[in-house]
Amino acid sequence: MWSARAEIWNNRDAIAHVWISDSNKPSLKEVLHHLNSDYIDSLFALSTYIVAGVALGALRETNFKSASQWFGAINRELENMWG
């Protein structure tokens, strides 16, 4: 069971982190040719849930004032880009 888990994580890492610096893990190019689109969709969903969980944890540790300042900075950047 552990090797199946490791394969899922390696595939997820290859999809989510295109520039993997760990030479022991497969690259995006190495995994794409043997994965079907449904599996790739599942890996992207898994990545999204993981990132959302990390972001939620960070937000819980951030006070409202800091979060508001960060949100304002992001909005200003978006306005500058698409203004």
Image (spheres, helix red, strand yellow):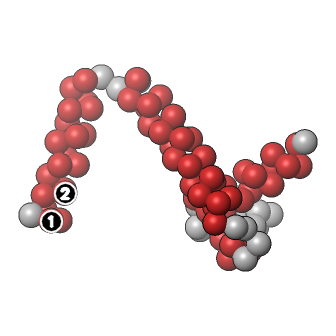
Q: Counting other residues with Cα less than 10 Å from the Cα at mark 2, is it few (<14), some (14-19), or many (20 or more)? A: few
Q: In which quarter of the image is the C terminus?
A: bottom left
Amino acid on which the number 2 mark rests in the picture: Leu
Q: Which residue lies furthest to the left in this view?
A: 83
| As drawn, 55 above or below 10 | above
| As drawn, 62 above or below 14 | above
**Depth order, front residue of 22/79:** 79
Residue 72 placement (x, y as % from top left): 17, 42
Amino acid on which the number 1 mark rests in the picture: Trp
The circle on residue 24 is none
Which residue is under mark 1? Answer: 82
Q: In this view, does 1 lie to the left or right of 58?
A: right
| As drawn, 55 above or below 57 | below
Element on which disc 2 rests: helix
Kindly check if marks 1 and 2 are in contact, taking CB atoms under 8 A apart as contact. Answer: yes
- Compute the Cα span from label 1 to label 2: 6 Å
Which residue is under mark 2? Answer: 78
Q: In which quarter of the image is the N terminus?
A: top right
Q: In this view, does 16 lie to the left or right of 64?
A: right
Element on which disc 1 rests: helix
Q: Counting other residues with Cα less than 10 Å from the Cα at mark 1, is it few (<14), some (14-19), or many (20 or more)? A: few
Q: In this view, does 55 lie to the left or right of 77?
A: right
